[in-house]
Amino acid sequence: PPNYFCPLTLHVMENPVVDGCGHCFDRDAILSWLRFHPLCPISRKPLDNESLVPAHALKQRIDCWKEVHASLNGEPNLLKLSETDSHSQFELMLLPQERRVLSLIKFRKEVRRHREDCKLCVWSTVGAVFICVVAVVLIAIYVFDVDIKGPL
């Protein structure tokens, strides 16, 4: 699952911690980050070592997940964590509310594409009906030997 990966290392977290904003990081990765940057790498808010809190529940879930998936050799590819996962590396680094906005944008794009497909389908149907009408008229002319000239 994407929330098991540290946004700094892009690896499964060994010792997850939570900052004041609610972001989870691997302890070693965030401590290394904080040596050079006094800000949260995601929200850019001030952050220090003392504000990091161990994420015990997350660590237990990660450990359980690792046991179940012990057959994996190394880290799974972040671009394709599972067949049903659609999160990219970029999306993993977003805040939950930013992910919701991004998912809404993707949804609206899908709706727009669907509407365009429907318009294309309608015009295709209109074209097909027109061709059928013309074909029926031509068949009727041929079968009933209708004189198209009309009165002179």
Image (spheres, rainbow, N blue to C red):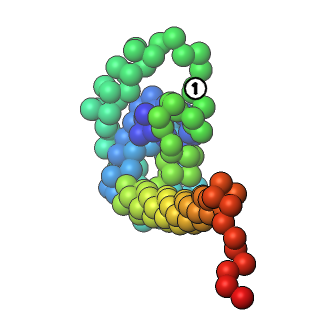
Residue 141, above or below 51: below
Quarter of the view holding residue 108: bottom left
Give the farthest residue toward the bottom. Answer: 152
Q: Nearer the viewer, residue 75 or 142?
A: 142
Res 9 visible: yes
Left-right relation of 60 to 4:
left
Residue to which mark 1 is pinned: 75
Residue 102, above or below 75: below
Residue 34, above or below 77: below
Give the farthest residue toward the left. Answer: 57
Give the farthest residue toward the top. Answer: 71
- Count of marks placed on residues: 1
In the rendered image, which quarter contains the C terminus? bottom right
Image spot of residue 60 (x, y percent): 31, 25
Q: Nearer the viewer, residue 138 or 147?
A: 147
Q: Helix, strand or loop at disc 1?
A: loop
Image point (40%, 15%), residue name: 68
Image point (33%, 52%), residue name: 22
In the rendered image, which quarter contains the N terminus? top left
Image point (44%, 43%), residue name: 25
Give the farthest residue toward the front. Answer: 152
Quarter of the view holding residue 79: top right
Rate crowding at label 1 as few (under 14), some (14 to 19) or many (20 or more) other CA atoms within 10 Å. few
Left-right relation of 65 to 9:
left
Image spot of residue 94 (x, y percent): 47, 55
Image spot of residue 7 (x, y percent): 51, 45
Left-right relation of 57 to 84:
left
